[in-house]
Image (cartoon, rainbow, N blue to C red):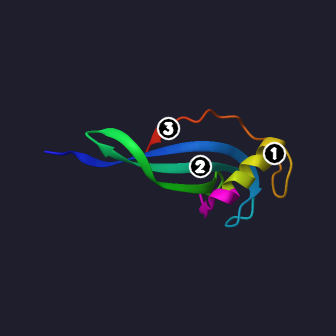
């Protein structure tokens, strides 16, 4: 008998202050990376899906972004200035959260 499945991990990459596209408020947005890994006998072996998204902390709206956009937002947050970034990035360690 072979036991296989998937396991999800959620990484918080940055916290940025952006203007929300839904509510229009300049609020904190979390930049997140969701990785789904294939498991064999409950051991995660390799990732087969990676998705990036930002979520508004004011209204809860989530917007999907590409890998390139996520890297750009993360770089803007690290430098402390950029297009829509108003605040500073909060340094959070990358810890997996089971989804």
Select label 2 or label 1 by which is in front. 2
- Whole-percent x, y for residue 2 in the image: 18, 45
Q: Is residue 97 above or below residue 47?
A: above
- Callout 1 crowding tier (Cα within 10 Å): few <14, some 14–19, many ≥20: some
Label 2 SS: strand
Report which residue position mark 3 lands on.
96
N-term mark: 3 or 2 = 2
Report which residue position mark 1 lands on.
87
Q: Does 62 lie within the magenta span? A: yes
Select label 1 or label 3 by which is in front. 3
Mark 1 to mark 3: distance in Å? 25 Å
N-term mark: 1 or 3 = 1
Span shown in magenta: 60-69
Mark 3 to mark 2: distance in Å? 11 Å
Q: Which mark is residue 32?
A: 2
Mark 2 to mark 1: distance in Å? 17 Å
Q: Residue at x 76, y 50 (%)?
A: 17
Front-most of residues 67 and 62: 67
Label 3 SS: loop
- Whole-percent x, y for residue 29 in the image: 68, 51
Q: Is residue 37 above or below residue 63?
A: above
- Callout 2 crowding tier (Cα within 10 Å): few <14, some 14–19, many ≥20: many
Q: Does 49 lie within the magenta span? A: no
Q: Is residue 68 above or below residue 89?
A: below
- Whole-percent x, y for residue 83 in the image: 84, 58
Mark 1 and mark 3 residues within 8 Å of each other at the beta carbon? no
Mark 2 and mark 1 residues within 8 Å of each other at the beta carbon? no
Task: Give the position of the N terminus as an image quadrant.
Answer: top left
- Whole-percent x, y for residue 82 in the image: 85, 53
- Callout 3 crowding tier (Cα within 10 Å): few <14, some 14–19, many ≥20: some
Q: Quadrant of residue 23?
A: bottom right
């Amino acid at each position: 008998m072979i036991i296989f499945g998937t396991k999800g991990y959620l990484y918080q990459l940055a916290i940025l202050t952006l203007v929300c596209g839904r509510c229009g408020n300049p609020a904190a947005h979390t930049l997140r990376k969701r990785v789904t890994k294939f498991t064999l006998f409950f051991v995660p072996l390799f990732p087969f899906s990676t998705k990036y998204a930002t979520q508004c902390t004011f209204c809860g709206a989530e917007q999907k972004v590409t890998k390139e956009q996520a890297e750009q937002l993360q770089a803007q947050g690290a430098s402390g200035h950029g297009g829509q970034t108003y605040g500073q990035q909060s340094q959070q360690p990358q810890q997996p959260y089971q989804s």
